Amino acid sequence: MQTKENYFSKQVTDARQILIGIPKETDEGLYVVSVGCERCLPEFLVDRKTFPQHANKPQNMDFTTFEFVLEGEGKVQLGDELQEVKPGSIFTYSRGVPHRIENSRKKPMLKYFLVCAHHSSQQPFMAVHSGKAGFFQITSIGEVMELFELILSNANLDSAIASSICNSLAKALVLKLCEKANHFSQSGSLAWNTYNRALQFMRRNYFSLKSIEELANEVNVDPAYLSRIFRRFHKDTPYKFLVRLKMSHAASLLLTTGNLVKNIAFELGFENPFHFSRAFKSVYGISPESFVKQRRQERKPT
């Protein structure tokens, strides 16, 4: 029996790993088996050539793994193809594909992963690559990251429809990959590098970051220029993305800590609880108080 303890890698830190489970059968759908975000330890190394854990799986069921590098560098070999990976790199592989994932000791990877089950007659990533494995490079890192975060947050919910929501989000992720992926041809432009530095800084410091001017200063560009390149690669403003990062963290705090709204607002850099509540409603459509009440009602046994 697969458990979280023997399913996930132990060569990681700062890990959020959720094992939803393997469906009993698959029809025409895509089913999330596991999802997570993990920072690789310097010595991280995965080298799989055989798959005994798949021996007892239904014969008509296949699995596809989708990994997305957010920070750091490494080398990945899928079958006979070897590539260096970096922020924005995506690699996918199906059951039975030998793979080796080696971390850079100087620049350890922070990566998301998603494992999906599907009928063996289907290849959910066929629209992006032919065959059972492939490498891609994307520029819209923020959009893909947000979908991963949505899957993670819903996988954590104790709700009867949480699994269905995760499955729908996984399909959206595949469609986004089809739209945004370019076969391993990374743009090395100054604009891309500036955008990527800003994105990484926001992700690490969103809880204390108070303005886009502060962010622009950190990456040594003009705020107006930062907004332009952010729209180019992210299709959104840096301010809206910052607010979503803060509110996603706020939602987690509201559900897990029981802290007062004003205390959470202050922790996330809002001096006025009213401004925090307005920002929260712009993301979730309801006030923080209503959000907590709604989630508690969903968790009540029927």
Image: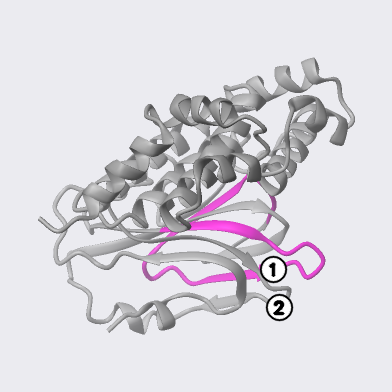
Amino acid residing under circle 2: Glu
Q: Please name the residue that numbered disc 2 is placed on.
A: 43
User: How many other residues sit within 10 Å of disc 1, few (<14), some (14-19) or many (≥20)?
Assistant: many
Q: Quadrant of residue 216?
A: top right
Q: Residue at x 42, y 83 (%)?
A: 6
Q: Earlier in the sequence, mark 1 or mark 2?
A: 2
User: How many other residues sit within 10 Å of disc 2, few (<14), some (14-19) or many (≥20)?
Assistant: few
> In front: 51, or 292?
292
- Give above or below for 115 relative to 68: below
Q: Residue at x 57, y 22 (%)?
A: 235
State the image coordinates of residue 102 (x, y, percent, origin top left).
Answer: 66, 70
> In front: 259, or 102?
259
- Give above or below for 3 relative to 29: below
Q: Quadrant of residue 276?
A: top right
User: At numbered mark 1, what does the secondary structure look like: helix, strand or loop?
Assistant: strand
User: What residue occupies the far left of the structure in this picture?
Assistant: 302
Q: Reply yes or no: does residue 273 show up in magenta.
A: no
Is residue 80 visible in the rendered structure shown here? no
Instruction: Quarter of the image for the N terminus: give it.
Output: bottom left
User: What residue occupies the far right of the structure in this picture?
Assistant: 220
The answer to whether the residue labelled 1 contacts the one labelled 2, judged by CB atoms less than 8 Å apart, is yes
What residue range appears in magenta?
85-114
State the image coordinates of residue 50 (x, y, percent, origin top left).
Answer: 42, 81
- Give above or below for 72 relative to 87: below
Q: Please name the residue that numbered disc 1 is placed on.
A: 103
State the image coordinates of residue 169 (x, y, percent, origin top left).
Answer: 35, 42
Is residue 29 visible in the rendered structure shown here? yes
- Give above or below for 283 relative to 295: above
State the image coordinates of residue 166 (x, y, percent, origin top left).
Answer: 31, 48
> In front: 272, or 248?
272
Q: Quadrant of residue 117?
A: bottom left
